[in-house]
Image (cartoon, rainbow, N blue to C red):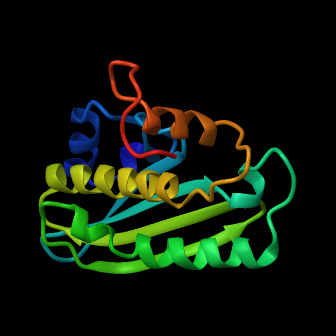
Amino acid sequence: MTDELPADAREAFEGHDAFAADEEDYRLTTTDFDATVTASERDDYATDFRVTVEVPTLDSAVTDGEVGDAVQRGWLDTMERRLEDAPMATRASVDLDEFDVTEEGGAVVVTYEFSFGDADRAAGIGKTFIEYVEGTYVESVVPGYEYGEPVSDLLGAAATGSDGERGGTPL
């Protein structure tokens, strides 16, 4: 249960309008992907945070055929290298204690672990990491395939502005 999380982390997530409590962690409500952040105590002033984001593999997102093994492997390798740069997207100095990208049955699970002394800022960092994964995923989609939801929705949103007019990069 989330009541077992450190009090300052629990208060930070509950005070952040983009997170909702879910069993043992907090789910980011502003993404179409399964994305959670959890926290645990440390012996020093900081708190340990774990961010997990699950996105579809390229092959499982495609609706009009198969993606070749070489394309899938190259896509995953490239995405993993890009995702490792997530700390540079934050406005804080964050060193990753752990970074992992694994493929599990049609999904890619991205995990970031870090420690931070300010739980309010750490909640924002967790949100930034999740948004970085989402943005990197959209930028990594290989053209020439038809994609199902939520990928097709994300691509559509990236191709139009908030006013519904065509904008952004040509996808």
Horizontal arrangement in the rendering, residue 141 relative to residue 134 (left or right): right
Q: Quadrant of residue 143?
A: bottom right
- Left/right placement of residue 13 relative to residue 170 reads left
Mark yes or no: residue 43 visible.
Answer: yes
Query: What residue is rendered at 70% in x and 43% in y?
Result: 147
The answer to whether residue 99 is above or below residue 29 is below
Residue drawn at x 16%, y 76% is 44
| Rendered location of residue 97, percent (x, y) | 33, 81
Residue sticking out furthest to the right: 65
Is 140 on the left-hand or right-hand side of 102? left
Q: Is residue 41 visible?
A: no
Q: Is residue 67 above or below residue 20?
A: below
Location of residue 57 with respect to 113 vertically, above or below: above
Residue 101: which quarter of the image?
bottom right
Percent across and percent down for residue 148 are: 72, 39
Using the image as rendered, state which of residue 70 and residue 33 is in the foreground: 70
Q: Position of residue 63 (x, y in %)?
A: 81, 44
Q: Residue at x 68, y 60 (%)?
A: 57
Q: Residue furthest top?
A: 163
